[in-house]
Amino acid sequence: MRILSIVGRSGSGKTTLLVKLIPLLKDRGLRVAALKYSHHERVEVDRRGKDSYRLREAGADTVVLLSRGQLMQVETLARQPTIEEIRDRLPAADLLLVESWKSAHLPAVEVIGDSGERVDLQAFGARIAVVCDRPLDDPLPRFTRDAAHRLAEFVASWCRS
């Protein structure tokens, strides 16, 4: 499974880009997994008062919510797992897209928002492309936000290489 990070400043359009990119990659025959990294210590994925929330609050180390066609697992962790540990626990996929996990030092596509502010590139792994709507003095392949099809071709080719 190849791993690619989508990085950029808050509000730059990373999630919007992923929402466009995932179906295009699937159309190209790739099995795609996505991981959204949050720097917050605790993220609530269930609403207060729901049974799964109550079970976790009661102290269950792992809560699995199963419905027709969906399975969600929430675990309480003693330490943050590595990206490799997470990848190894996922169902089979060709590509894992990771949104904004700086410390993993992954190959990355940088998304530059309207402000033009860039991320600290030293914190991330090697960039393979840039998404920006204006010209840049950068030797990497550049894609505009409306060129998601071209970016999908690029990522699919990278994934298969």
Image (cartoon, helix red, strand yellow):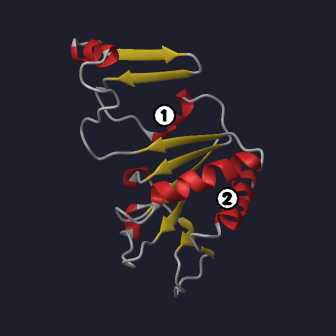
Crowd around label 2: few <14 · some 14–19 · many ≥20 (10 Å): some
Q: Quadrant of residue 38?
A: top left
Amino acid type at circle 1 is Ile
Judged from the image, the secondary structure of the residue bearing numbered disc 1 is: helix
Query: Where is the N terminus found, in terms of image quarters?
Result: top right
Residue under label 2? 155
Which residue is depicted at the point 37% across and 62% down? 123
Residue located 55% across and 31% down the image: 88
Left or right: residue 50 compared with residue 143: left
User: Where 104 falls versus 41 (above or below)?
Assistant: below
Task: Please tell me how many numbered marks the rendered image carries.
Answer: 2
Lower sequence index among marks 1 and 2 = 1
Distance of mark 1 from mark 2, alpha carbons? Answer: 21 Å
Q: Are marks 1 and 2 in contact (CB under 8 Å)?
A: no
> Residue 40, image x and y in percent?
26, 43
* Left or right, 5 with reference to 161: left
Q: Secondary structure at mark 2?
A: helix
Q: Quadrant of residue 54?
A: top left
43 displayed left or right of 133: left
> Could you tell me residue 65's position as x and y percent?
44, 17
Q: Which residue is mark 1?
A: 86
Alpha-carbon neighbours of circle 1 within 10 Å: few (<14), some, or many (≥20)? few
Q: Position of residue 73 (x, y in %)?
A: 43, 22
Q: Is residue 84 above or below residue 107?
A: above
Say which of marks 1 and 2 sits in front: 2
Kind of residue at disc 2: Val
Q: Quadrant of the C terminus?
A: bottom right
